[in-house]
Image (cartoon, rainbow, N blue to C red):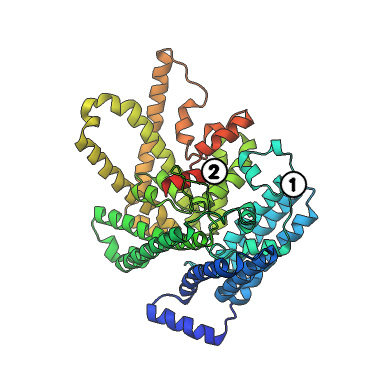
């Protein structure tokens, strides 16, 4: 499973020359060109393929263009994705009548193959290798198996989400290849179910107008974010945070630099997602119903909610607005499937644990997701204490404009600073590097969180005791319900005994993965 590539010499020369001129890694140039290639692919499809009534021609077009772009990036290592797709196809037919075996064998194979790939290819840096699109493919193939299994169940036994994605009719190998290699999505996402691909091929979205205009807007935004990212990288490169020059800065300056650097690091992902989403829009693939004013909504595959992300004031706002479709996938295929555990915290922990393992073996992934868990928990607790014990004693102060501005500035500063702290392990990956950066900033995040959790423990103890003395009963689980509502995915409705209510309320309760309806409201 070595990370070898077999690229034609002439092809290598011009890409390498472009990389040398721009000062960027060759692999990054290939990735950028592949994302941009989604736009001419969309143009060709709309101009020559879309009107052809033979669906196999559509499947063949997407399978060839997508696999060709994959080969352009990874050469003979493209065989890894072919093995994965063909294995899913075989397992689908072998265990078609046994959904449990299908899900278990398919999940084990794909996660095992991906982790084996990580074992042989991972380094201390972000390497753009075949494992990058393969991790996207793994989610696609695992979700596909779940949808096939759901297709064998009675309609009334499925949740709303499962009914929308369940496959009653199995695809051909060509269809599965086209779905897996779908241009503008196989490399960096977004995730979407097979049913969306089939609806698109069947022409269900063809009648709606305006997708190209929306796609070009998304491309423009992607290029803007890419430009900001490049300028930010020149100002605050990753290696700077490992130097004595950074360590010798004043404390407030260090944590503010860390926060800005974290924002610039996020923009790397956001720019790729925006450009990929724009190409899917130009294809006419992302239709998501109509807006309130009756116009077509083309944000059905959005992976980032820009307004919510940029105006957010807490860590949970990042969770709600960043990598939306991956979070949606985890909520549907991991978190909700753990409902039988009847414990919100364990289910949420299982979802975050899966995400960490899916990213790889580096300790930084696990520390970053653990910090997300703890910080979002603390935010819920702070909000509870503020509303119950602070606001009632502040009188008209909370209604004054100066207080509102001061609160907004404080929360925004916190939002930027703590995001950088939580993202540090995710970027530096190895323990030796991210712990050094934390040492330079005096481990301030850990100190603040530890102090707060100790305070909150005594706060809950005293208030619970006061409630008992005053004769008010405390319902079981009420004390820590706020602390465990870590995201709308972890909503109490999910564990309601009434399964119908669960399905009806879950779309309103999810934070780990906002629904498609919330996508169109926030874009």
Nearest the viewer among 61 and 325 is 61
Does 447 sit left or right of 501 as displayed?
Answer: left
Marker disc for residue 120: none
The residue indicated by pointer 1 is 100
Say which label, 2 or 1, has the lower sequence index.
1
* Quarter of the figure that contains the N terminus: bottom right
- Residue 386: image x %, image y %? 33, 31
- Residue 484: image x %, image y %? 48, 35
Q: Residue at x 38, y 59 (%)?
A: 436
The residue indicated by pointer 2 is 349
- Local SS, label 1: helix
- Local SS, label 2: helix
Does 378 sit left or right of 185 as displayed?
Answer: left
Q: Nearer the viewer, mark 2 or mark 1?
A: 1
Is 186 drawn above or below residue 380 in the view shown? below
Nearest the viewer among 470 and 276 is 276
Residue 429 visible to the viewer: no
- Residue 399: image x %, image y %? 24, 30
Nearest the viewer among 332 and 458 is 332
The answer for how far apart the CA atoms under marks 2 and 1 are is: 23 Å
Is 6 drawn above or below residue 481 in the view shown? below
Q: What is the count of numbered marks? A: 2
Q: Residue reaching furthest left?
A: 402
């Amino acid at each position: 499973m070595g990370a070898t590539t077999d690229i034609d010499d002439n092809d290598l020369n011009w890409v390498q020359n472009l990389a040398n001129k721009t000062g960027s890694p060759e692999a990054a140039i290939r990735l950028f060109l592949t994302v941009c290639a989604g736009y001419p692919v969309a143009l060709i499809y709309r101009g020559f393929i879309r009107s052809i009534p033979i669906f196999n021609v559509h499947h063949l077009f997407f399978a060839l263009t997508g696999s060709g772009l994959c080969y352009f990036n990874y050469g003979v290592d493209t065989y890894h994705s072919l093995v994965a797709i063909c294995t899913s196809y075989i397992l689908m037919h072998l265990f078609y009548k046994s959904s449990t075996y299908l899900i278990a064998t398919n999940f084990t194979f794909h996660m095992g193959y991906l982790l084996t790939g990580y074992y042989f290819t991972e380094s201390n840096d972000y390497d753009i290798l075949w494992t990058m699109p393969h991790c996207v493919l793994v989610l696609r193939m695992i979700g596909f198996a779940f949808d096939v299994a759901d297709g064998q169940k009675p309609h009334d036994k499925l949740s709303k989400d499962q009914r929308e994605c369940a496959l009653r009719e199995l695809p051909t190998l060509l269809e599965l290849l086209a779905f897996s290699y779908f241009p503008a999505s196989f490399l960096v996402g977004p995730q979407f179910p097979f049913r969306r691909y089939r609806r698109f091929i069947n022409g269900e979205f063809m009648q709606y107008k305006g997708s190209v205009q929306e796609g070009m807007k998304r491309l423009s935004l992607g290029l803007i974010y890419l430009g900001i990212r490049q300028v930010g990288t020149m100002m605050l490169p990753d290696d700077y945070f490992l130097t004595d020059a950074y360590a010798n800065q004043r404390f407030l300056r260090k944590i503010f630099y860390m926060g800005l650097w974290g924002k610039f690091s996020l923009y790397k992902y956001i720019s790729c997602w925006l450009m990929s989403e724009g190409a899917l829009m130009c294809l006419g693939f992302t239709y998501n119903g109509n807006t309130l004013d009756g116009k077509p909504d083309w944000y059905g595959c959005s992976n980032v909610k820009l307004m919510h992300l940029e105006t957010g004031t807490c860590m949970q706002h990042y969770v709600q607005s960043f990598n939306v479709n991956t979070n949606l996938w985890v909520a549907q295929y991991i978190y909700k499937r753990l409902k039988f555990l009847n414990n919100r915290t364990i289910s949420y922990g299982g979802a975050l644990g899966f995400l960490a393992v899916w990213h790889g073996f580096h300790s930084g992934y696990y520390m970053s997701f653990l910090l997300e868990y703890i910080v979002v928990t603390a935010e819920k607790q702070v909000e509870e204490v503020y509303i119950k014990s602070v606001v009632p004693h502040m009188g008209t102060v909370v209604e004054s404009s100066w207080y509102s501005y001061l609160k907004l500035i404080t929360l925004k500063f916190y939002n930027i600073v703590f995001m950088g702290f939580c993202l540090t392990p995710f970027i530096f990956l190895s323990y030796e590097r991210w712990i050094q950066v934390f040492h330079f900033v005096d481990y301030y995040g850990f100190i603040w969180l530890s102090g707060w959790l100790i305070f909150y423990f005594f706060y809950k103890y005293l208030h619970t005791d006061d409630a008992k003395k005053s004769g008010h009963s405390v319902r079981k689980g009420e004390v820590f319900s706020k602390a465990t509502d870590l995201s709308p995915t972890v909503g109490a409705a999910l564990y309601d005994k009434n399964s119908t209510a669960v399905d009806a309320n879950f779309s309103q309760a999810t934070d780990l993965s906002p629904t498609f309806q919330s996508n169109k409201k926030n874009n």
